[in-house]
Image: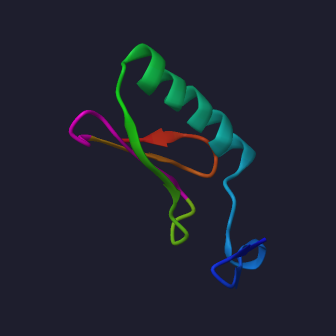
Amino acid sequence: MQLLGVDCDRCMREPTAEQLRSLYRLCHLLTNVMFHPIHIVRLDERTLNLFILAGQSEEIELEIQPDGSIEP
């Protein structure tokens, strides 16, 4: 896939299956149970953790480790 002239398949890392399962559960909890908006979800390529920024005032910061564990 090309985006702005860059081959994204070569430069983009992907989350693990465990991270995706945790992300799905966390997104459900944040949006459907706690009614908080999610502002950012991104993969930190240095740590390989998924970073989530959520909350009405962006006050919730969470990271999902490659093994699927969630860290505040």
How many discs mark residues in the rendered view?
A: 0
In the rendered view, does 46 fall on the left or right side of 19? Answer: left
Does 58 sit above or below residue 21? below
Q: Is residue 27 above or below residue 67?
A: above
Q: Quarter of the image containing the N terminus? A: bottom right
Q: Which residue appears at 47% of the width and 17% of the height?
A: 32
Q: Which residue is at a point 55% across and 50% down the rendered structure image?
A: 65
Residue 45 x %, y %: 55, 69
For the rendered model, the colour scheme is rainbow
Whole-percent x and y of residue 17?
74, 44
Going by the image, does 58 lie left or right of 35? Answer: left
Question: In percent of the image, x 48 and y 39: which residue is there?
Answer: 70
Q: Nearer the viewer, residue 34 or 1?
A: 1
- Foreground residue among 3 and 57: 3
Reply yes or no: does residue 40 show up in magenta: no
Is residue 51 located in the magenta-colored stretch of the structure? yes
The region drawn magenta spans 49-59
Find residue 72 and report its horizontal and vertical position in percent: 36, 41
Residue 55 locus on image (x, y percent): 29, 34
Judge whether 47 appears above or below 5 on screen: above
Residue drawn at x 76%, y 78% as measured from the top left: 10
Looking at the image, residue 39 sits to the left or right of residue 32; the answer is: left
